[in-house]
Amino acid sequence: MATEEYVPVTADDWYQRRRDDAEGRFFRRVADQGPRKGEGGSTRQGIYCLTADGQLLVYKNAGQNPEVMREALRQGLREWRKLPPQRRQPGAVQVGEPDQIDPRYTRTPPRGGLIVNVFTRILDHQDGELCRGTCRTLGGNQAARDHLWLTEAEWQSLVPADPRPGNGFPLPAAIAERLLRFHLVDNTRGEPPMWRREDIRSQLMMLTVEEATAAVVRLRLDGFALLATHPDDAQADRGFDVRLLGYIGYDRTRKMINRFEVVAVGDHWGEGPFTRGARPGRTPLGIAFELADGKSAADRVPPQAARDLRSYFGHDR
Amino acid sequence: MRSVSRLLILGAAVLTGGQRASAVEPIRPEQFSRLQALIKPDPNEDKWTQIPWLTDLWQARKIAAEQGKPILLWEMDGHPLGCT
């Protein structure tokens, strides 16, 4: 129904409710027709069925519940069909180009950069092995998604100028910090709090050249980190004691990264204001990184932490 | 590889200072693929990702107008395709 009967689009309300441009104003004009008017800058999140010229047909605030979503879609179609046929015909509404785009609240992947898909999932122990975890929060056992962005200069810094098998060197500091602060987070139940710089209590991430030929360079990443909101992790209300292993491939002919696969597994504890319902105590959490081709709209969705772009790219040091 | 392992152990000892030692076992290479598969979504796990979502409301307006369709906008705090 969403694919056949509608034009489906997703957005992050944090940007949409703030952007001062044609798209932002259009969205708020639609939202103002419903119950979520965003008083005091508050959220307008939800499911909206609307017309191209900005009439709200249906609003529901329950994006994660499939049945609520389906009912909203059915109700939206009923409202749509009540409109005069001449308003529903293809081409009946003219939509021009937006007059401006607010650069403060739009994000595009860095030119020449790398997009890495990031998946996070709660895990459990069973018979001495890790398995998929269970929790009481609706959808909290599913894989959560995010994206890691690296600039062209950053991914180039991963490849040594003279790679020799066996040689090791630290993961470049800017990349290490981004991974740790913004991507080793528990976003399985909602918007996670990011780690402050001082929350990185210890870490070491080393790259080792496993193979270097005229065609390829293959690197291995080994690492660990202790992230905690208190210097004594036993007193920290939130933390992550984590190990990492990964493999990075560089195509020397095409001069591009062709593999970026990292797994991080460790014991996570605590929760944030928007991630309530964490399992008690320290429980296993897994995070997997893999290269995206950047062709789909989903791949180009900005990292959650890129709302503060200066901080994300370490320009606030 | 051995030298890196030694460095990691040394680093753990040095960098953690007064912290408690990590209770988490290092990930072994033979565990890698299994852990990846465990963490990543199965192809049919998130059926909503099979919908060809746009991420530009203005573009959605233009397509909806051209095709004579309503728009479904799924808007959350935290992008539905990028957070949670």
Image: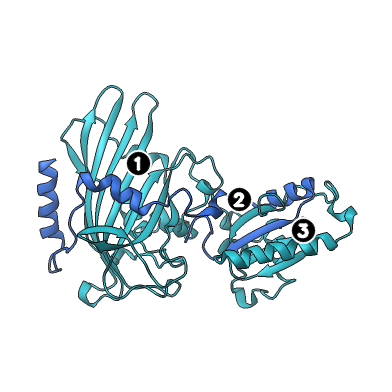
Chain colours: A cyan, B blue
Quarter of the rendering containing residue A59? bottom right
Secondary structure of the residue carrying tag 2 is: loop
Q: Earlier in the sequence, mark 3 or mark 1?
A: 3
Counting other residues with Cα less than 10 Å from the Cα at mark 3, is it few (<14), some (14-19), or many (20 or more)?
A: many
Q: Chain of mark 1?
A: A
From the viewer's side, name the closer residue of A317 and A45. A45
On the image, the x and y values in percent for residue A292 come to: 45, 42
Using residue A268 as the reference point, say whether residue B72 is left or right of it: right
Q: Amino acid at mark 1?
A: Phe
Q: Amino acid at mark 3?
A: Thr
Residue at left offset 40%, top offset 75%:
A277
| Quadrant of the snapshot with the C terminus of chain A | bottom left
Q: Amino acid at mark 2?
A: Trp
Question: Looking at the image, can residue A53 be seen?
Answer: yes
Q: CA distance from mark 2 to mark 1?
A: 25 Å
Q: CA distance from mark 3 to mark 2?
A: 17 Å
Residue at left offset 58%, top offset 63%:
A66
Query: Which residue is labeled 1 in the image?
Result: A260
Using residue A247 as the reference point, say whether residue B55 is left or right of it: right
Query: Which residue is labeled 2 in the image?
Result: B53
Query: Which residue is labeled 3 in the image?
Result: A51
Q: Chain of mark 3?
A: A
Secondary structure of the residue carrying tag 3 is: loop
Using residue A242 as the reference point, say whether residue A314 is left or right of it: right
